[in-house]
Amino acid sequence: MTAAPATLDRIRHHLVGLRMPRALEVLEHLLRQLERGEISALEAIDGLLDAELSLREGRRVKAALKMGRLLTVKTLAGFDFAFQPSLDRNRILTLAGLDFISRHEVVHFLGQPGCGKTHLAIALAVEAVQAGRSVYFTTLAELVGSLAKAEREGTLRERIRFLCRPQLLVVDEIGYLPVVAGGGNLFFQLVNARYERGAMILTSNRGFAEWGEVFGDTVVATALLDRLLHHAIVVRIEGASYRLRRHADLLPDTSSARPIASPEPPRRRGRPPKLRTADLSAAT
Ligand code: ADP
Ligand code: MG
Protein backbone atom coordinates (compact mmCIF):
# COMPACT_ATOMS: atom_id res chain seq x y z
CA MET A 1 0.00 0.00 0.00
CA THR A 2 1.53 3.26 -1.14
CA ALA A 3 0.47 6.66 0.13
CA ALA A 4 -0.46 9.14 -2.58
CA PRO A 5 2.33 11.72 -2.95
CA ALA A 6 -0.12 14.56 -2.34
CA THR A 7 -1.31 13.01 0.93
CA LEU A 8 2.25 12.43 1.99
CA ASP A 9 3.08 16.05 1.29
CA ARG A 10 0.16 17.16 3.40
CA ILE A 11 1.25 14.94 6.27
CA ARG A 12 4.76 16.41 6.10
CA HIS A 13 3.29 19.87 6.01
CA HIS A 14 1.14 19.14 9.06
CA LEU A 15 4.06 17.70 10.99
CA VAL A 16 6.03 20.87 10.32
CA GLY A 17 3.03 23.04 11.27
CA LEU A 18 2.51 21.04 14.47
CA ARG A 19 6.22 21.28 15.26
CA MET A 20 6.80 17.54 15.28
CA PRO A 21 10.36 17.27 13.95
CA ARG A 22 11.04 13.79 15.26
CA ALA A 23 7.83 12.44 13.73
CA LEU A 24 8.85 14.02 10.44
CA GLU A 25 12.19 12.30 10.68
CA VAL A 26 10.78 8.82 11.21
CA LEU A 27 7.94 9.21 8.70
CA GLU A 28 9.83 7.79 5.68
CA HIS A 29 11.11 4.83 7.62
CA LEU A 30 7.66 3.98 8.97
CA LEU A 31 6.14 4.30 5.50
CA ARG A 32 8.68 1.89 4.06
CA GLN A 33 7.89 -0.59 6.84
CA LEU A 34 4.21 -0.11 6.12
CA GLU A 35 4.70 -0.72 2.40
CA ARG A 36 6.63 -3.89 3.10
CA GLY A 37 3.78 -5.06 5.31
CA GLU A 38 6.00 -5.18 8.38
CA ILE A 39 3.71 -2.94 10.43
CA SER A 40 0.04 -2.03 10.32
CA ALA A 41 -1.31 1.47 9.69
CA LEU A 42 -2.17 1.74 13.39
CA GLU A 43 1.36 0.77 14.33
CA ALA A 44 2.70 3.40 11.95
CA ILE A 45 0.59 6.11 13.62
CA ASP A 46 1.67 4.82 17.01
CA GLY A 47 5.34 4.83 15.98
CA LEU A 48 5.06 8.37 14.68
CA LEU A 49 3.52 9.74 17.89
CA ASP A 50 5.78 7.70 20.09
CA ALA A 51 8.92 9.06 18.42
CA GLU A 52 7.74 12.63 18.89
CA LEU A 53 6.66 12.05 22.48
CA SER A 54 10.01 10.54 23.48
CA LEU A 55 11.81 13.54 22.04
CA ARG A 56 9.62 15.92 24.01
CA GLU A 57 9.83 13.83 27.16
CA GLY A 58 13.62 13.77 26.89
CA ARG A 59 13.68 17.55 26.51
CA ARG A 60 11.30 18.06 29.40
CA VAL A 61 13.40 15.87 31.69
CA LYS A 62 16.59 17.61 30.61
CA ALA A 63 15.14 21.05 31.30
CA ALA A 64 13.66 19.97 34.65
CA LEU A 65 16.97 18.47 35.77
CA LYS A 66 18.70 21.72 34.92
CA MET A 67 16.06 23.82 36.68
CA GLY A 68 16.30 21.56 39.71
CA ARG A 69 20.10 21.95 39.69
CA LEU A 70 20.62 18.25 39.20
CA LEU A 71 23.72 18.78 37.14
CA THR A 72 25.34 15.40 37.79
CA VAL A 73 22.96 12.61 36.98
CA LYS A 74 23.09 9.46 39.11
CA THR A 75 20.69 6.57 38.74
CA LEU A 76 19.45 3.71 40.86
CA ALA A 77 20.51 1.38 38.05
CA GLY A 78 24.03 2.72 38.51
CA PHE A 79 24.05 2.01 42.24
CA ASP A 80 25.89 -1.16 43.25
CA PHE A 81 23.76 -2.51 46.11
CA ALA A 82 26.14 -5.44 46.53
CA PHE A 83 28.75 -2.95 47.76
CA GLN A 84 26.43 -1.80 50.59
CA PRO A 85 24.98 -4.99 52.06
CA SER A 86 23.61 -3.08 55.07
CA LEU A 87 21.34 -1.16 52.74
CA ASP A 88 17.95 -2.72 52.06
CA ARG A 89 17.55 -2.57 48.28
CA ASN A 90 13.79 -3.02 48.48
CA ARG A 91 13.51 -0.09 50.82
CA ILE A 92 15.25 2.13 48.28
CA LEU A 93 13.12 0.74 45.45
CA THR A 94 10.02 1.50 47.52
CA LEU A 95 11.27 5.07 47.92
CA ALA A 96 11.66 5.17 44.13
CA GLY A 97 7.89 4.61 43.96
CA LEU A 98 7.80 8.24 45.21
CA ASP A 99 4.90 7.87 47.63
CA PHE A 100 7.02 9.73 50.16
CA ILE A 101 6.68 12.80 47.95
CA SER A 102 2.89 12.60 47.91
CA ARG A 103 2.96 12.13 51.68
CA HIS A 104 5.29 15.11 52.18
CA GLU A 105 7.75 13.00 54.12
CA VAL A 106 11.40 13.59 54.93
CA VAL A 107 13.98 10.98 53.90
CA HIS A 108 17.30 11.04 55.75
CA PHE A 109 20.36 9.33 54.33
CA LEU A 110 23.00 8.97 57.04
CA GLY A 111 26.46 7.54 56.65
CA GLN A 112 30.17 8.13 56.33
CA PRO A 113 31.63 10.11 53.40
CA GLY A 114 31.56 8.15 50.15
CA CYS A 115 28.93 5.61 51.21
CA GLY A 116 26.51 6.75 48.49
CA LYS A 117 24.23 9.26 50.22
CA THR A 118 24.40 11.89 47.48
CA HIS A 119 24.17 9.23 44.78
CA LEU A 120 20.93 7.85 46.25
CA ALA A 121 19.49 11.32 46.88
CA ILE A 122 20.16 12.35 43.28
CA ALA A 123 18.91 9.04 41.89
CA LEU A 124 15.58 9.46 43.72
CA ALA A 125 15.37 13.07 42.57
CA VAL A 126 15.94 11.94 38.97
CA GLU A 127 13.16 9.35 39.36
CA ALA A 128 10.93 12.14 40.64
CA VAL A 129 11.74 14.38 37.66
CA GLN A 130 11.03 11.55 35.24
CA ALA A 131 7.70 11.02 36.96
CA GLY A 132 6.86 14.70 36.41
CA ARG A 133 7.50 15.93 39.96
CA SER A 134 9.29 19.21 40.55
CA VAL A 135 12.63 18.94 42.29
CA TYR A 136 15.33 21.26 43.60
CA PHE A 137 18.79 20.12 44.69
CA THR A 138 21.13 22.09 46.92
CA THR A 139 23.71 21.63 49.65
CA LEU A 140 23.05 22.97 53.13
CA ALA A 141 25.91 25.46 52.76
CA GLU A 142 24.51 26.80 49.46
CA LEU A 143 21.01 26.90 50.86
CA VAL A 144 21.97 28.79 53.99
CA GLY A 145 24.14 31.12 51.89
CA SER A 146 21.22 31.90 49.60
CA LEU A 147 18.85 32.45 52.54
CA ALA A 148 21.35 34.74 54.29
CA LYS A 149 21.80 36.74 51.09
CA ALA A 150 18.05 37.04 50.66
CA GLU A 151 17.73 38.18 54.27
CA ARG A 152 20.36 40.89 53.71
CA GLU A 153 18.55 42.03 50.61
CA GLY A 154 15.15 42.00 52.29
CA THR A 155 13.82 39.19 50.07
CA LEU A 156 13.82 36.29 52.54
CA ARG A 157 10.09 35.75 52.25
CA GLU A 158 10.31 35.41 48.46
CA ARG A 159 13.30 33.10 48.70
CA ILE A 160 11.48 30.82 51.14
CA ARG A 161 8.45 30.86 48.90
CA PHE A 162 10.67 29.88 45.94
CA LEU A 163 12.16 27.01 47.94
CA CYS A 164 8.71 25.81 48.98
CA ARG A 165 7.62 25.39 45.38
CA PRO A 166 9.38 22.16 44.41
CA GLN A 167 7.55 19.03 45.47
CA LEU A 168 10.90 17.55 46.49
CA LEU A 169 13.74 19.55 48.00
CA VAL A 170 17.08 17.77 48.39
CA VAL A 171 19.46 19.26 50.96
CA ASP A 172 22.83 17.56 50.67
CA GLU A 173 25.82 17.60 53.00
CA ILE A 174 24.43 18.45 56.39
CA GLY A 175 27.34 18.33 58.79
CA TYR A 176 30.35 18.60 56.50
CA LEU A 177 30.79 22.31 57.05
CA PRO A 178 29.90 24.27 60.15
CA VAL A 179 26.79 26.36 59.55
CA VAL A 180 27.40 30.11 59.67
CA ALA A 181 25.94 32.03 62.61
CA GLY A 182 22.20 32.46 62.17
CA GLY A 183 22.18 29.79 59.46
CA GLY A 184 20.34 27.26 61.58
CA ASN A 185 17.62 29.77 62.20
CA LEU A 186 17.23 30.50 58.47
CA PHE A 187 17.17 26.78 57.65
CA PHE A 188 14.52 26.32 60.35
CA GLN A 189 12.32 28.96 58.74
CA LEU A 190 12.45 27.05 55.47
CA VAL A 191 11.89 23.65 57.10
CA ASN A 192 8.97 25.07 59.02
CA ALA A 193 7.48 26.54 55.86
CA ARG A 194 7.75 23.18 54.06
CA TYR A 195 6.64 21.12 57.06
CA GLU A 196 3.84 18.74 56.04
CA ARG A 197 3.63 20.61 52.72
CA GLY A 198 6.56 19.31 50.72
CA ALA A 199 8.91 16.34 50.75
CA MET A 200 12.62 16.57 51.46
CA ILE A 201 15.66 14.34 51.18
CA LEU A 202 18.48 15.22 53.57
CA THR A 203 21.93 13.66 53.64
CA SER A 204 24.35 13.81 56.54
CA ASN A 205 27.55 12.27 57.79
CA ARG A 206 26.59 13.21 61.34
CA GLY A 207 24.12 11.62 63.69
CA PHE A 208 21.10 13.60 64.88
CA ALA A 209 22.69 13.85 68.33
CA GLU A 210 25.38 16.02 66.75
CA TRP A 211 23.05 18.53 65.13
CA GLY A 212 23.47 20.94 68.04
CA GLU A 213 27.13 21.10 67.07
CA VAL A 214 26.45 21.21 63.35
CA PHE A 215 24.11 24.18 63.71
CA GLY A 216 26.00 25.70 66.64
CA ASP A 217 22.73 26.00 68.52
CA THR A 218 20.93 23.25 70.42
CA VAL A 219 17.63 25.06 70.57
CA VAL A 220 17.48 25.46 66.81
CA ALA A 221 18.72 21.89 66.32
CA THR A 222 15.94 20.59 68.55
CA ALA A 223 13.30 22.58 66.71
CA LEU A 224 14.69 21.39 63.35
CA LEU A 225 14.72 17.75 64.43
CA ASP A 226 11.20 18.06 65.79
CA ARG A 227 9.96 18.85 62.26
CA LEU A 228 12.42 16.75 60.35
CA LEU A 229 11.88 13.54 62.31
CA HIS A 230 8.11 13.72 62.26
CA HIS A 231 6.94 11.83 59.13
CA ALA A 232 10.52 10.73 58.53
CA ILE A 233 12.19 7.80 56.85
CA VAL A 234 15.70 7.28 58.20
CA VAL A 235 18.08 5.25 56.05
CA ARG A 236 21.41 4.52 57.68
CA ILE A 237 24.20 3.28 55.45
CA GLU A 238 26.72 1.48 57.61
CA GLY A 239 29.19 0.64 54.88
CA ALA A 240 32.50 2.11 53.83
CA SER A 241 33.41 4.64 51.16
CA TYR A 242 32.82 3.59 47.58
CA ARG A 243 35.36 6.17 46.46
CA LEU A 244 38.09 4.52 48.53
CA ARG A 245 37.05 0.93 47.88
CA ARG A 246 40.31 0.03 46.19
CA HIS A 247 42.46 1.78 48.76
CA ALA A 248 41.03 0.55 52.03
CA ASP A 249 44.45 -0.70 53.06
CA LEU A 250 45.87 2.82 52.90
CA LEU A 251 43.39 4.27 55.35
CA PRO A 252 43.59 4.56 59.09
CA ASP A 253 41.20 2.19 60.84
CA THR A 254 38.83 4.98 61.76
CA SER A 255 37.77 5.55 58.17
CA SER A 256 34.93 3.08 58.27
CA ALA A 257 34.68 2.43 61.95
CA ARG A 258 32.98 5.49 63.40
CA PRO A 259 29.31 4.65 63.48
CA ILE A 260 26.73 7.24 62.76
CA ALA A 261 24.71 7.95 65.85
CA SER A 262 21.40 6.20 65.83
CA PRO A 263 18.38 8.19 64.70
CA GLU A 264 17.10 8.10 68.20
CA PRO A 265 16.75 11.46 69.73
CA PRO A 266 19.84 13.00 71.07
CA ARG A 267 20.41 11.96 74.59
CA ARG A 268 24.02 12.96 74.77
CA ARG A 269 25.54 16.36 75.21
CA GLY A 270 22.44 18.24 76.22
CA ARG A 271 20.41 17.09 73.29
CA PRO A 272 16.85 18.06 72.59
CA PRO A 273 14.84 17.44 75.67
CA LYS A 274 11.80 15.62 74.41
CA LEU A 275 12.21 13.13 71.68
CA ARG A 276 9.23 11.83 69.97
CA THR A 277 9.79 8.11 70.03
CA ALA A 278 6.43 7.42 68.51
CA ASP A 279 7.37 9.47 65.48
CA LEU A 280 10.68 7.73 65.27
CA SER A 281 9.25 4.27 65.32
CA ALA A 282 6.95 5.29 62.48
CA ALA A 283 10.07 6.45 60.71
CA THR A 284 11.30 3.14 59.48
P1 ADP B 1 28.47 10.48 49.92
O1 ADP B 1 27.49 11.49 49.44
O2 ADP B 1 27.88 9.48 50.87
O3 ADP B 1 29.72 11.09 50.44
P2 ADP B 1 28.51 9.76 47.13
O4 ADP B 1 27.09 9.39 46.92
O5 ADP B 1 28.95 11.09 46.61
O6 ADP B 1 28.91 9.62 48.66
O7 ADP B 1 29.43 8.63 46.51
C1 ADP B 1 30.79 8.87 46.14
C2 ADP B 1 31.03 8.38 44.74
O8 ADP B 1 30.91 6.96 44.70
C3 ADP B 1 30.01 8.89 43.74
O9 ADP B 1 30.65 9.03 42.48
C4 ADP B 1 28.97 7.78 43.69
O10 ADP B 1 28.32 7.76 42.43
C5 ADP B 1 29.81 6.55 43.91
N1 ADP B 1 29.13 5.53 44.66
C6 ADP B 1 28.93 5.49 45.99
N2 ADP B 1 28.33 4.35 46.37
C7 ADP B 1 28.12 3.64 45.25
C8 ADP B 1 27.55 2.36 44.97
N3 ADP B 1 27.09 1.57 45.96
N4 ADP B 1 27.49 1.97 43.68
C9 ADP B 1 27.98 2.74 42.70
N5 ADP B 1 28.55 3.95 42.89
C10 ADP B 1 28.63 4.41 44.14
MG1 MG C 1 27.71 13.51 49.40
Image: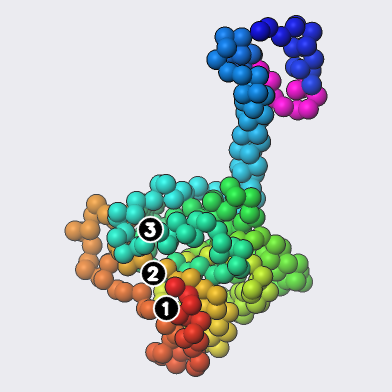
Q: Mark 1 belongs to which amino acid?
A: Pro
Report x, y in % for residue 115: 36, 61
Circle 3 residues within 10 Å: few <14, some 14–19, many ≥20:
some
Q: Secondary structure at mark 3?
A: helix
Foreground of the two, 115 or 179: 115
Could you tell whether 123 is left or right of 129 in the image?
left
The image's mark for residue 89 is: 3
Q: Secondary structure at mark 2?
A: strand
For marks 1 and 3 on the same chain, the one whose residue lies earlier in the sequence: 3
Foreground of the two, 245 or 98: 98
Give the spatial CA distance, label 1 vs label 3. Answer: 20 Å
User: Magenta stretch: residue 13 in it?
Assistant: no
Q: Which residue is mark 2?
A: 236
Residue 29 location, quadrant: top right
User: Magenta stretch: residue 24 in it?
Assistant: yes
Give the spatial CA distance, label 2 vs label 3. Answer: 12 Å
Residue at the (40%, 59%) spot, across then down:
90
Report x, y in % for residue 1: 66, 7
Mark 3 beta carbon near ligand 1 (under 8 Å): no
For marks 2 and 1 on the same chain, the one whose residue lies earlier in the sequence: 2
Q: Which residues are magenta?
A: 15-27
Foreground of the two, 274 or 150: 274
Q: Is residue 76 above or below residue 150?
A: above
Mark 2 beta carbon near ligand 1 (under 8 Å): no
Give the spatial CA distance, label 2 vs label 1. Answer: 8 Å
Foreground of the two, 284 or 185: 284
Q: Is residue 20 above or below residue 101?
A: above
Q: Which residue is mark 1?
A: 263
Residue at the (23%, 62%) spot, across then down:
251
